[in-house]
Amino acid sequence: MIKMGLMAFLALLILNPVVLCGLLVIFLSYLRRIKHERKHFRTAINNDFFEGRYYIKNALKLGFLSSVITTLLGLELTKQWIFVYMGITFVGIVLSLYIDLNTAFLLIFTGSSIGIVSLQLFSDKLIVPTSLKPFFDVKPGIVFSILAIFYLAKLLMLRGYHQDSFQPKIYNGKRGRRLIRYSLKDQTVLPLIVLVPGNYIHSLISFWPVFSFGGQSFALFVLPLWVSWTLRLWRNTVESELKNAKVNTQQELTIAIVGTILGFLIPITGIFVFAVLLLLVILRFVQRYAKMKRKGKWYAETHDGIRVVAIQPETPAAKMNLEIGDVIIMCNGVSVTTESEFYEALQRNSAYCKLKVRTYEGQLKLAESAIFANSPHEIGVILFH
């Protein structure tokens, strides 16, 4: 009986429809990325299906860590709360092919959950619709715990990224120059082990294990926590963008942890802590938008050299530590301003390449490396065409 229950639990963990839907969306996003890169850059910048590898790796590694946290905390969720969350998550994952609404969906749903409980805490005489009563059993501390796990997972995921992970997209600027916007999108589904009160799951699956604590029955359930985020940059460096994202996520994580502690000890404070978190998220969004309009240089096409749009991994360009936004001024001692001039200069030395480069910040540097013999187009630099 226990063995069958364990097998069913593992099957629910692996074959969860939300997990499989997320993997399918990741694969479709990969196909769309490859198609876009081949259309606009005549080659795929990175053929590797790294999105799927990161999805599975983060689901296993961060899912294990998150499940340990939820198990130690003994998070208890009602089946109604779980069903509504899974429905919203499923819709969000499907829509993520076009727009990433994960943070918005999560904040709206968790904020609504905390708000519903707060209404009861502020007024004992409040008449509650029958359909909302199961949501009153999900305390603010539990909801904040899920938010804290979301921000913790996001922070850990951010640490594994660098410039190769950002995908370029070309736009036409107002002055006739082409501009580049870089974006980084990542998502995974974390399996969280939570407790569901009652015998609902056991009534559907007779061999599902049920535990009793303090005279009440609980069943284990795997809650699929969708973690998704997108970074976009027009007028900022990759390092600065990642640093800002990490700092913002750390602040949001801190507030969520404070909300978890206060939500368990003083539940009535939950709505106020959530208001602070929501205000911070909105303020960061407004500040970032305003800064993008005022400060920084565009990643734009230039006539004073050739702009590096992207770098293919494991190529001579990657070994030379070229970065997106760099402007190649000279190649093998020859000034270059067009793609054709660049490849002609490369052929002056079929085995070695020496570049003079102006960085995005305006500093000059030298870069050199051996190249593939008689294959100048395989240097690994993606340029405007």
Image: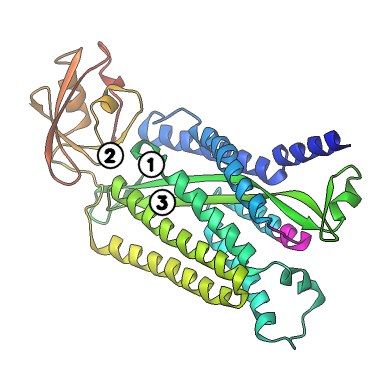
| Residue at mark 3 | 231
How was this image coloured?
Answer: rainbow
Q: Position of residue 344 (x, y in %)?
A: 17, 21
| Residue at mark 1 | 166
Q: CA distance from mark 3 to mark 1?
A: 9 Å
- Residue positioned 34% across, 67% down in the render: 287
Q: Which of the marked residues, 3 or 2, is nearer the chain's N terminus? A: 3
**For residue 74: magenta?**
no
Q: CA distance from mark 3 to mark 2?
A: 16 Å
- Asked if the residue at tag 1 contacts the one at tag 3, i.e. Cβ–Cβ closer than 8 Å, the answer is yes
Three-letter residue code for mark 3? Leu
| Nearer the observer, 358 or 280 | 280
- Residue positioned 29% across, 27% down in the render: 318
Visible residue check, residue 371: yes
For mark 2, does the 10 Å Cα neighbourhood hold few (<14), some (14 to 19), or many (20 or more) residues? many
Which range of residues does the magenta coloring cover?
Answer: 75-84
Q: CA distance from mark 1 to mark 2?
A: 9 Å
